[in-house]
Amino acid sequence: MDGAEVISLIKKSLPDFSALLVSQDYRDEIYLKVSPQVFQATALALHKILSSPVMMLFALDERNSAGVFVINAVFVNSKEGQWIIVSMDLSQENPVFDSLAKSIHSASLFEREIWEMFGITPQGNPDLRRLNLHDEVWPKGNFPLRKDFKTMMPGDLGEYKFNRVEGGGVFEIPVGPVHAGIIGPGHFHFSVAGEPIVNLELRLGFTHRGVEKLFEGKSFFDALRLVECISGETAFAYSVAFATAAEKISGIVTLEKTAYLRGIFLELERMYNHVNDIGGIALDVGFSFPAAYAALIKEAILQLNERLTGNRYLKKVNLIGGLALDLDESKKCVLFDALKKIKNDFNELVKMLDSSVSFMDRVDTTGVLIKKTAQDLGIVGLVARASGIPTDLRKYFPGIYQEAKFKMIPAEGGDVLSRLRLRFFEFMESCRLIEEFTVKLGGSAETKVSAPAKPETSALGYVEGWRGPVLCYLKTDVHGLIARCKIVDASSHNWQGLTYAVLGNIIPDFPVCNKSFNLSYPGNDL
Amino acid sequence: MIYILKNRILKGIVTRNIDPFLARKTEIAGRELKSLIRKNFGRSLDLREVDTGSCGACESEIISANNPFYDLQRFGVNFVASPRHADALLVTGPVAKNMFLALQKTYQAMPEPKFVITCGDCALDGGLFKDSYYVCQAVKDILPVALHIPGCPPKPAVIIQQLLAFLKQKQV
Ligand code: SF4
């Protein structure tokens, strides 16, 4: 699809639509600049036409260069493997825009973020409570992502108001931010009537470290190290998303081999996380033997990572333009050998879980997220697939996965069991993909191509990480350094799904529901 | 269940040879650790972990240290659910503003005597995040830190070795 086709599609629902500017700098990105008056209608039209949630919605402070704030909304055209970015300029004197959240739920959290970080008001958004900058510690009137923000100015503090459920027999259970286990911090506010949960409200942001501000003024090279430290167990996927954006900006066409190597490590990352979650699900219903078994498989994969790359979490493996290493024949043997053992062990694990009736009883029909709700919320990635939504960037964007005939089988149930089964399936599919990629891997001794970053250019990098899509929008300044880097993890979309999946379940089933989603705190909070 | 029991009887004990060299090293260090903990802590050293803004990889490695391969617990190191049961606090990540209070409260909830261990480069001085508007001072400026375990993230074997070295040094 090109720009003209997108416009004619939009015209079907908005007859007098016109864009201020249409451009397509890369095959997979179509950029539409529209006036603030039609931004909301355009976004709504694209949301319907493409049946895409708002994949990203973020602001840029361009008051210095153009005297405006810019708002970008990103939609995915999964049929043709393309991104459509709708953009508008807002005057700096009156930074206000019509909220999308009233019609598109998936825009809601993004708008709250824009509001707290930039002080731009999404007019009509029904819920403008802060997300990451907690009212108790961050004074009002400080907008850290504005370019002229230097340090925090003292001011009034506030208080966060939870939604209340009232009525006879309803009681509240606050949990967190420090939890009993070895996990990240988040606050869960349950309202319970008798046994079942009637409402769950999440308060996140505890691991907010101001990552987006830290990117400003960094070179790609330095930024890459930071990207890998945002969400540790997705380090490689983050680095790939960032590197693809940086490569587009620098005009780098990577070697064929780079795609295969990245594919191999992405799938290894998926495997160790999936098996970790499978073990976690078993553990959270008290089935500790398979959990220990899964922990061993995870350890085997982490040790394999280390033998192949020198790093258990695949940090410092990826570079802009390629990879820091290659897999020679002996490493390929190590990989094949280890995979064979891992596959055997994994089959045992699956049999163990499948043959336990009491385990199945705990996970079957627990924590159901129905397809309709998932669609309305704009759920993505693994959780969406488990609820019957066929969505996976590996399937829809051209590349090595399509050549390898990547199989995507969405589950139907939307319960813990579906998410578990999907992980079983994806783990084995990852094994197959790694084998296929490794066989195809060959070519020259070079591992990377380099070119300097172009100034004042932007691009979108993306990859399907193990949780779901990781998106990274990058824009450079006049010196070719980073002016804005916006990262969106699948978790940001999916945390809302958890609050619906647990409704009607009992509190003791919350851990297993939560584990079956296994969303990231630091990836969400940034 | 029947499947597991049948397997257990048919196959006997299955030891997995992931990395025999590393396993031996862990075993040796662990034995020594165990005897020190026996002497100094009345058989077990209980840790409470607090994430104050980590990326999650440090947690993942701490969990790995408890997997059947390293099995830190067999040497007497337990991870407990409540600070009230803990001898030491294990802190990961830079201290994000939102976690400052939670960190202090967790420390206050611990009974005396107590000490603090920081785990991972972020917890030392904020690491890559130290210049951020939302990161407080280093853990060591907030609480008395007795031991730092370096790495990004520190490998499970390193966690075990550092604990051992620390307790040994306390001996003299
Ligand atoms: S030290 Fe490294 S692994 Fe640990 S929290 Fe910091 S960035 Fe993550």
Image: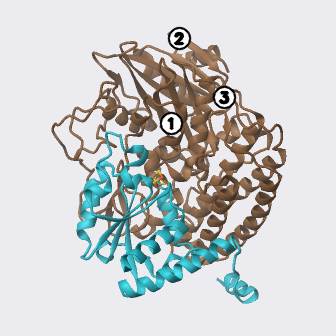
Chain colours: A brown, B cyan
Neighbour class for label 3 at 10 Å: few (<14), some, many (≥20)?
some
- What's the residue type where badge 1 is placed? Ala
Q: Nearer the viewer, residue A364 or B38?
A: B38
Neighbour class for label 1 at 10 Å: few (<14), some, many (≥20)?
many
Q: Nearer the viewer, residue A296 or A90?
A: A296
Chain to which mark 1 belongs: A
Q: Nearer the viewer, residue A356 or A288?
A: A288
Name the residue that disc number 3 marks.
Answer: A450
Whole-percent x, y for residue A147 in the image: 34, 25
Q: Nearer the viewer, residue A416 or A228?
A: A228
Q: Residue at x 42, y 32 (%)?
A: A103
Chain to which mark 2 belongs: A
Name the residue that disc number 1 marks.
Answer: A223
- What's the residue type where badge 3 is placed? Ser
Neighbour class for label 2 at 10 Å: few (<14), some, many (≥20)?
few
> Could you tell whether A495 is left or right of A172 in the image?
right
Disc on the earlier residue, 2 or 3: 2
Image quadrant where residue A64 sits: top left
* SS class, disc 2: strand
Name the residue that disc number 2 marks.
Answer: A21
Q: Distance of mark 2 from mark 1, alpha carbons?
A: 31 Å
Considering the image in quadrants, where does the N terminus of chain A appear? Answer: top right
Vertical order, A247 against A307 (above or below): above
Whole-percent x, y for residue A347 in the image: 73, 69
